[in-house]
Image (cartoon, rainbow, N blue to C red):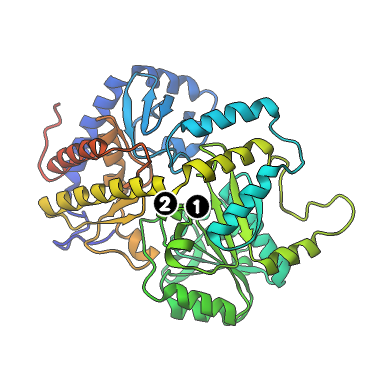
C-alpha cells in the first residue's frame, strides 16, 4: 500500500471507519434486493460463485446485481432499480447499451445468416477503415482481445523465429498465458493467483516497468524477444500515462533489436476514434483492439504492417488442412462484421468522442474538487472518455507504483456504496466510463454520491442507517 500524506498506510481513510460503513452498506444492499439474493442462492447450485464468469462476483457487493435490461447509459436490475451506468459492460458497451444504429443493423443482419466461413463485402469496408484509423493496412478478426493478442504474438514468433514476449509490469492483455507475470522484489514472478505449472515463463516472457527505457534496453539487448506487447498508456492497474519520450524510445529500441511492436488499444480506444495510436502518433508493427467494436457482441481485430501481412500470406500458403495455430470458426463471422461496420460508420465517431470528452472532463473536475475538499492524498486522471482516481497524491510512473496506490478495502466499499445509490462503477477499479448517452445530470448524480461517500469516509459513522 502507498503511504498517505500523514505517513500511514490507510490512504487517508481509517480502517475502523471502512468496517463500520461496510456493515451498514451490506445490510442496505440486502434489504433492497430480495429478488437478486434469491436468484443468487439458486445460481450457486449451478455456477462457481453463482455467476457465469467469476469476475461478475467481484463488485464488492454481498451478492451480484442481476441485470434485467439496459439502454444508453442506464441499466435496470431484477429488483426494479435503475442505475446510472459508468461501467458500460467494462468497456464492451462504451458507446451505450442497445445503441439504436446497432440494434437495427443486428436485427436485420441475423435474418440473412450469421456465419458462413466465407468473406463478405463488410470485411473489405471494415479492414479499409481500420487501416485508415490505425495506419496499418492488413487486418484479421478474432472473437476477443485475448485471442487477438494471442494470435498476434504467435505471428510475431513465426516471423521473427524468437520465443519471448516482453510486457510491462501491471499490464493487462487479457488471459494470454505468457503475459501472466509481474515484478516482485525486482524479479519476474507468476501474477498473483496464477499457477505457473502450464507455462515456462523464464523461456517465454520478460517483464519490466513501464516508462523505464533503461530496463527495456537491457531486456531487449539479447535480441531474443519476438515482440513487445504494450498499451499506449497503462490502464488496468490504475492509469499510468506514458512519460514524454517513452514511446519514441520504445519504437527506437524495438527497431534496433529487430523486435516487433504490438500496441493493444482495447482500453485506450477511449482516447479517440484512432485510440492512443492516433492520439500519440504511434507507429506500431501490429495493433490489437477488442471489446468495443460490436456493441457487446464478442469481437476483436488485429492489424499489421504490409511487410508482416505479406510475410503471413507466405507462411500460411501451404496445402492441406492447417490452421497454423490461430483463427477460429466464429472469427470474422458475417453478423459481427456487419455490426463492426455499423459501429465504425455511425457509432465510434468524432462526434461521439467530442461529447464523451466534454462530459468526462466535467467528471474529472468534480472528482478533483471533492478530493481537495476533503484533503485526501489522492489524484484523478482522465484519458479521453475514461476517468479514474488513485490513492496517491500524484500520477504513478509505473505499474509497481500504481499497485501501491490501490486499496481493495476502499475500492470494494466504494462500488457497494455507489450501487446502493443507483450508480454503477467499473469493478476492480475506481474507473468511470462516459458514453455518448451520459449527461451532465449524470455527473451531478456522481458528484452528490461521491460527496456523501467521502463525508462518511472522513468521519466516524454509526452502523445505524
Side of 422 relative to 371 (left or right):
right
Question: Which is nearer the eye, 353 or 196?
Answer: 353
- The residue identified by callout 2 is 270
Q: Position of residue 287 (x, y in %)?
A: 57, 60
| Quadrant (top left, top right, bottom left, bottom right) of the N terminus | bottom left
Q: Position of residue 216 (x, y in %)?
A: 49, 76
Q: Are marks 1 and 2 in contact (CB under 8 Å)?
A: no
- SS label for mark 2: helix
Relative height, residue 39 to residue 210 (above, below): above
- Residue 163 seen in render: yes
> In percent of the image, x 86 and y 49: which residue is there?
321
Q: Nearer the viewer, mark 1 or mark 2?
A: 2
| Quadrant (top left, top right, bottom left, bottom right) of the C terminus | top left
Side of 260 relative to 11 (left or right):
right
- SS label for mark 1: loop
**Residue at the extreme right of the image, as rendered:** 319
> In percent of the image, x 47 and y 30: which residue is there?
100
- The residue identified by callout 1 is 266
Q: How many marks?
A: 2
Please tell me the numbered disc located at residue 370: none
Side of 119 relative to 338 (left or right):
right
* Residue 30: quadrant of the picture: top left
> In percent of the image, x 30 and y 39: which residue is there?
415
For disc 1, the neighbor class at 10 Å (few under 14, some 14 to 19, many from 20) is many
Q: Position of residue 282 (x, y in %)?
A: 49, 68
Question: Which is nearer the eye, 1 or 363?
Answer: 363
Give the distance between the C-alpha atoms of the residues marked 1 and 2, in whole angstroms.
9 Å
Amino acid at each position: 500500500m502507498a503511504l498517505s500524506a500523514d505517513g500511514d498506510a490507510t490512504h487517508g481513510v481509517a480502517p475502523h471507519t471502512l468496517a463500520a460503513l461496510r456493515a451498514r452498506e451490506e445490510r442496505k444492499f440486502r434489504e433492497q434486493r430480495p429478488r437478486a439474493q434469491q436468484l443468487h442462492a439458486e445460481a450457486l447450485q449451478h455456477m462457481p460463485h453463482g455467476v457465469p464468469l467469476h469476475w461478475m462476483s467481484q463488485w464488492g457487493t454481498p451478492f451480484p446485481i442481476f441485470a434485467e435490461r439496459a439502454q444508453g447509459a442506464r441499466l435496470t436490475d431484477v429488483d426494479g432499480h435503475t442505475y446510472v451506468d459508468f461501467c458500460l459492460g467494462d468497456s464492451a458497451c462504451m458507446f451505450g447499451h442497445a445503441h439504436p444504429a446497432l440494434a437495427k443493423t443486428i436485427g436485420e443482419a441475423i435474418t440473412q445468416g450469421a456465419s458462413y466461413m466465407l468473406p463478405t463485402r463488410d470485411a473489405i469496408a471494415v479492414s479499409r477503415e481500420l487501416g485508415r484509423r490505425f495506419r496499418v493496412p492488413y487486418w484479421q478478426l478474432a472473437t476477443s482481445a485475448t485471442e487477438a493478442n494471442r494470435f498476434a504474438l504467435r505471428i510475431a514468433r513465426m516471423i521473427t523465429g524468437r520465443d519471448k514476449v516482453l510486457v510491462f509490469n501491471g499490464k493487462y492483455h487479457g488471459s494470454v498465458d505468457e503475459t501472466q507475470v509481474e515484478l516482485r522484489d525486482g524479479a519476474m514472478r507468476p501474477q498473483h493467483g496464477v499457477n505457473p505449472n502450464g507455462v515456462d515463463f523464464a523461456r517465454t516472457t520478460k517483464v519490466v516497468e513501464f516508462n523505464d527505457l533503461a530496463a527495456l534496453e537491457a531486456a531487449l539487448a539479447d535480441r531474443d524477444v519476438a515482440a513487445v506487447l504494450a498499451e499506449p498508456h497503462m490502464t488496468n492497474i490504475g492509469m499510468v500515462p506514458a512519460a514524454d519520450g517513452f514511446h519514441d524510445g520504445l519504437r527506437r529500441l524495438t527497431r534496433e533489436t529487430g523486435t516487433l511492436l504490438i500496441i493493444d488499444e482495447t482500453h485506450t480506444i477511449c482516447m479517440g476514434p484512432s485510440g492512443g495510436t492516433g492520439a500519440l502518433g504511434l507507429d506500431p508493427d501490429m495493433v490489437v483492439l477488442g471489446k468495443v467494436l460490436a456493441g457487446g457482441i464478442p469481437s476483436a481485430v488485429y492489424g499489421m504492417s504490409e511487410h508482416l501481412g505479406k510475410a503471413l500470406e507466405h507462411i500460411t500458403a501451404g496445402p492441406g488442412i492447417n490452421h497454423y495455430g490461430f483463427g477460429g470458426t466464429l472469427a470474422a463471422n458475417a453478423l459481427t462484421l456487419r455490426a463492426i461496420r455499423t459501429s465504425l460508420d455511425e457509432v465510434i465517431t468524432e462526434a461521439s468522442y467530442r461529447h464523451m470528452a466534454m462530459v468526462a472532463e466535467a467528471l474529472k473536475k468534480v472528482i478533483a474538487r471533492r478530493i481537495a475538499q476533503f484533503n485526501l492524498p489522492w489524484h484523478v486522471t482522465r484519458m479521453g472518455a475514461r476517468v479514474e482516481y488513485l490513492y496517491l497524491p500524484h500520477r504513478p510512473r509505473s505499474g509497481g507504483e500504481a499497485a501501491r496506490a490501490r486499496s481493495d478495502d476502499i475500492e470494494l466499499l466504494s462500488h457497494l456504496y455507489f450501487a446502493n445509490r443507483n450508480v454503477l462503477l467499473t469493478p476492480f477499479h475506481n474507473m468511470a466510463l462516459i458514453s455518448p448517452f451520459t449527461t451532465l445530470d449524470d455527473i451531478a448524480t456522481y458528484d452528490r454520491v461521491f460527496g456523501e461517500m467521502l463525508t462518511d469516509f472522513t468521519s466516524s459513522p454509526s452502523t445505524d442507517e
